[in-house]
Amino acid sequence: MNASWPPGRIAALLGLLVLGALTGAAGWLVVDLWFPAGLLLGLLALAGLFLGARIALGTGLGVGAAAAGWFLSYVLLSLPRPEGDFLLGSSGIGMYAYLLGGCVVAVICATMRGALDGPVPASRPRG
């Protein structure tokens, strides 16, 4: 398969990677700050980002780039700092709910079919 990607598509994927990292970092901090409302706000922000990436690029690849940035922010924020403590405290269930909920939202947005994909053809009986 010899498919060349235009520079605009590569730039869009890199932009979605950065936007996913920024949204993930903001979401992690909001979830830790206000637990019930922050979790809902963070998941809604992720849903908007993933759905926008799906619509903008027309494929699940945009959702994958945004989700990779989101998960990268989780990994970087959960590393221990030189002082020996963590920026994200995993003492509550909110962090795990945000991680699981974000994965579910990413999978839903990556596998959904849009109106531009067309209808699924029904099989015709042969006769």
Image (cartoon, rainbow, N blue to C red):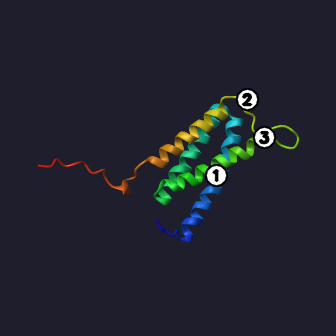
Return the residue found at the far left: 127
Front in this rendered view, residue 64 or 35:
64
**Residue, disc 3:** 87
Residue 85 in the image: x percent, y percent? 83, 37
**Residue, disc 1:** 69
Crowding around mark 2 (Cα neighbors within 10 Å: few <14, some 14 to 19, many 20+) is few
Residue at (64, 33) in percent of width and height? 96
Q: CA distance from mark 2 to mark 1?
A: 24 Å
Q: CA distance from mark 2 to mark 3?
A: 12 Å
Of badges 3 and 1, the one in the foreground is: 1
SS under mark 1: helix
Q: Is residue 13 left or right of residue 22?
A: left
Q: Are marks 2 and 1 in contact (CB under 8 Å)?
A: no
Q: Are marks 2 and 3 in contact (CB under 8 Å)?
A: no
Q: Amino acid at mark 2?
A: Ser
User: Which mark is on residue 119?
Assistant: none
Which quadrant of the figure has residue 44?
Answer: top right
Compared to 34, does 19 lie above or below? below
**Residue, disc 2:** 91
Labels in figure, total? 3
Which quadrant of the figure has residue 28?
Answer: top right
**Of the image marks 2 and 1, the number of the one nearer the N terminus:** 1
Q: Amino acid at mark 1?
A: Gly
Residue at (87, 44) in percent of width and height? 82
